[in-house]
Image (cartoon, grey):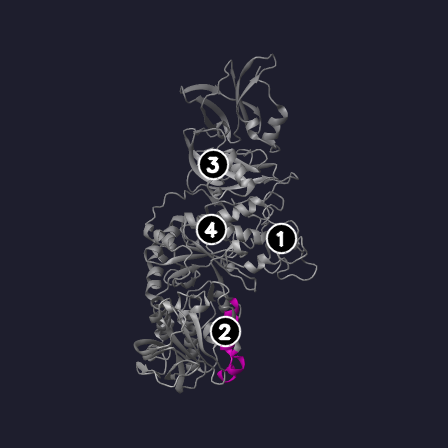
Amino acid sequence: MGLILETNLVNAIAEGGYRGDPFAVLGMHQGQDAEGKNGLYIRTFQPQAAQVEVIRTDTNQSLGLMRRVHPAGLFQLDIWEEMTFFPYIFKITLSAGQSYMAEDPYRFWPVLGELDLYLYGEGNHLQIYDKLGAHLMTHQGVDGVLFAVWAPNAKRVSVVGTFNDWDGRRHMMRPRGSSGIWELFVPGLKEWDMYKYELIGADDRLLPLKSDPFGFAFEMRPKTGTLVFDTSKYQWQDADWLKGRRAEANDWRRPISVYEVHLGSWRRNSLENNRWLTYREMARELPAYLVEMGFTHVEFLPLAEYPFDGSWGYQVTGMFAPTSRYGTPDDFKYLIDALHQAGIGVIMDWVPAHFPRDAFGLAQFDGTALYEHADPRKGEHKDWGTKIYNYGRNEVANFLIANALFWIKEYHIDALRVDAVASMLYLDYSRKEGEWIPNEFGGRENLEAIAFLRRLNEVVFAEGQGATTFAEESTAWPMVSRPTYVGGLGFGYKWNMGWMHDTLHYMSENPIHRKYHHNELTFSLLYAFTENFALPLSHDEVVHGKGPMLDKMPGDEWQKFANLRLYYSYMFMHPGKKLLFMGNELAARTEWRFADSLDWDLLKNTNHKGIQKLIRDLNTLYRETPALYEMDCEGSGFEWIDGNDFENSCFTFIRHGKRPEDTLVVACNFTPVPRYNYRIGVNESGLYEEVFNSDAPIYGGSGVGNAGTIQTEAPGWNFKEFALQVVLPPLSVVCFRLKEAGSSRRRDMPL
């Protein structure tokens, strides 16, 4: 007679109906037979096996064949008068006669500690990615993979893959109390093994197989399996860069000129079926180009794993995995490393505002609205067909905040550009009356999202070793880039969407009409110092029928290029950090297409080459002129000379640095009419040098200018003590710097 079988549990295991802790049934247990005789029994479910032998590994002794206790493949071995647990291994023989050795996952103790479970439940486990997901490890002297996933409303969670023939009965996971976390150590698995989770919901419904929310690598789309990956083996070479980043932490008095890149369409290999470049191929080309062009940072459109190419990465299904399109996670690290070694900072688009409905992803993860709000009035973005995170749930907020730190710490990302912040802040965002629920005070503000964003920024600035954040926020929400302790959202910088819309509208006007829209260029200076602004000319401005930048400019061919040179030059002179989408520097002729390369052949044309040269020189002037970046975020860095000359559509102003000698005088002519003998008031007398002219022949301009230097004269002008009489070329920006000071200087000029 054998030890007592719990018949109902045995049947449930074999027939797939078991719910609860499989460790209560499988593995090694103490028991009694019907007569009260003590012993041990080992039970395993091996439906592929013809027979199973147990070998005691501490003595290398065979304990004999297990008896089949259920025809589906449940085996049991009774060991009489033995009450002390010992290590063992199975020798499994298949019906064809082949044999192999296999560890029993149900003989291993739990791995996750109670503190990990508690901190995650409280929403304070900032490195929960080190615990949840799939982790290669040695446990009780055996190599394998620890799987852990949060699914509090599931009745059963299993790890499945080719290693167990996708059979959810074979690797059922252990529930960890009331935490909602399930874990299982699976011995013998290794890097690149593929897996998913099989869940049975609270209603006993078998759910679609789910990818791992904390997965570190994924199969190439359209496949959706998660891959075991060791994130710790890459050897970084960017220690000097990180040291400098920590030293400059939170310093907005530095030049930031960003080149925004969609990695799959920057450049393609035309000789190999127009394929995109890999991370490592990009590492050989992109850093050198950025250095040549003078950019300080690159910003990647989202590179966390996503299934649909046409989403450009903004519908993420693998928040902890670089997309497999371009290579492995270590290949992505290699690209970032190469950029850092070239002196280029890395910003990555990050998408916490929504996630897609794909059945293999987060939506209805355990059969309930787990990561999303259950009420569609709070949990769905109708415009995008996506779900909205439940920011008020501790574990969800923890998931997102830990993810932000993951990219900063594990991938050395220098900044996160947070997408669609406005959609997070307002409960009625893009919703009609009756389609949204007011907050507890009756307002439209999403209090949970606000608290989440503040916590996010506090954590990034406290733990991110000099990393920062950018907000794409398109409304007049106050203090987006102000510290949380004064009531702000805590971002490092905010995209100035108002500046972008106003200036693009102004530039689209025929120059003869621009005097009627003069305020569209001056308005931004009324609020330019209320935030730490970045000026974006991003991918959003050259898609969906908006046309390329060149086509936004009015006039004939020459005027289009002159207007574009003027617009870019004005952008670099205006307070705020800079961002240009790839292709803008080429004066692209077509809208951006995510499936095609930029048209690099345009550079064979003099006008297009001139725009590229202009951007290169603007970046150089910007980086080498402290007045253009040191006081970007404070009013004393900007001084109008004349912002009211609407009749001529001219604007003149001064950019100040911390040192008087860094002062730069800027004059802009937004008409195709040259302005001769145009007087500009200045604060200091002396010899001024023309240091930049967007109408220079090397950029494709007409060559009108000021012959190098100009001497100040009296009387003064524009309420200034001195004046310059200059030539303003057509559709141009010209800049002057004091080369030799005269005997007089205005004493009350701002410093």
Of the image marks 2 and 4, the number of the one nearer the N terminus? 4
Nearer mark to the viewer, of 3 and 4 = 4
> Disc 3 versus disc 1: distance between alpha carbons?
32 Å
Of the numbered discs in the image, which one, if any, rests on residue 176? none
> Disc 2 versus disc 4: distance between alpha carbons?
32 Å
Nearer mark to the viewer, of 2 and 4 = 4
Name the element at disc 1.
Answer: helix
Residue 642, above or below 290: below
Which residue position holds label 4? 460
Whether residue 203 is visible, yes or no, is yes
Asked whether, in this view, residue 746 is left or right of residue 648, the answer is left
Instruction: Give percent across and percent down for residue 102.
Output: 45, 29
Tell me if label 3 and label 2 are in contact, CB under 8 Å: no
> Disc 3 versus disc 4: distance between alpha carbons?
28 Å
Name the element at disc 4.
Answer: helix
Of the image marks 3 and 1, the number of the one nearer the N terminus? 3
Name the element at disc 2.
Answer: helix
Asked whether, in this view, residue 268 is left or right of residue 400, the answer is left
Quarter location, residue 136? top left
Query: Which residues make up the magenta segment?
Result: 497-518
Of the image marks 3 and 2, the number of the one nearer the N terminus? 3
Instruction: Give percent across and percent down for residue 744.
Output: 33, 78
Which residue position holds label 3? 146
Name the element at disc 3.
Answer: strand
Which residue position holds label 2? 503
Instruction: Inspect the magenta stretch and tell me whether residue 616 lies in it.
Output: no
> Disc 3 versus disc 2: distance between alpha carbons?
54 Å
Whether residue 273 is visible, yes or no, is no
> Disc 1 versus disc 4: distance between alpha carbons?
26 Å
